Amino acid sequence: MTLVVVFVLIGVLALIAIVAMARGHNQGGEDLDALARKLRPVDVRAFHNLMNEKEEDFLRENLSLREFRAVHCQRMLAAAEYVRCAAQNAGILVRLGEAARLSPDPEVVAAADRLLENAVRLRLQALQTVPLLYLAIIVPGLGHSRRVFFDAYDVMTRQVVLLGLRYPTHGMASAL
């Protein structure tokens, strides 16, 4: 019985997350300059440090179990915040990609399509990554495979820079 309740709760939380992400994507009425101001910088190196297996091993060896658990919990919560921030930025970049797709320049349209594809993929990966990071609080070591998430974020950031060479990105490339 408890297992059923747990699965129902997980399903409801997943549905709420999907609705929240869709709602964030469809908020209209803001121009690209206003959206650019909403971008939050993401320190990819700091995220990689949080996910570093050697760093985790070092902490495990040099801290008591209680201290390690507390530090590990804080590290995974910080990593989850980085992922949420990157997902929010990806949502804003979806809006930039949608605007750029209206350009008459076929190269801009192609760059916008690549940006859109990667931004949507990154938001979907965030839906998978955040719960795994929370689970990694209980089971250390599960979060390590999530470093791939920020490799995708790096690719998306580079695509914004390339798009900015031919289309006004309203300072978004420098804000990432």
Image (spheres, grey):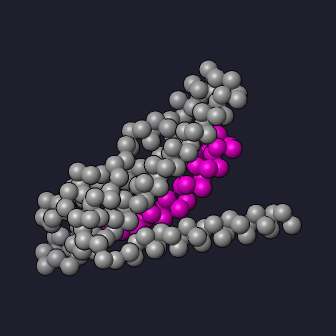
Residue under the image location 15 percent in, 64 percent down: 168
Lateral position of residue 126 relative to residue 25, left or right: right
Residue under the image location 52 percent in, 49 percent down: 80
Residue under the image location 79 percent in, 67 percent down: 5
In terms of image quadrants, where is residue 30? bottom left
Q: Could you say where residue 159 lies in the image, as x and y percent from the top left? A: 26, 58
23 vs 7, nearest the viewer: 23
Q: Quadrant of the N terminus?
A: bottom right
* Residue 18 located within the stretch drawn in magenta: no
175 vs 55, nearest the viewer: 175
Q: Is residue 102 above or below residue 94?
A: below
Lateral position of residue 44 relative to residue 133, left or right: left
Q: Could you say where residue 130 lies in the image, as x and y percent from the top left? A: 55, 55
Q: Could you say where residue 108 lies in the image, as x and y percent from the top left? A: 18, 70
Q: Could you say where residue 97 lies in the image, as x and y percent from the top left? A: 28, 70
What secondary structure do most residues of the magenta stretch adopt? helix
Q: Is residue 145 above or below residue 172?
A: above
Q: Which residues are magenta?
A: 115-143
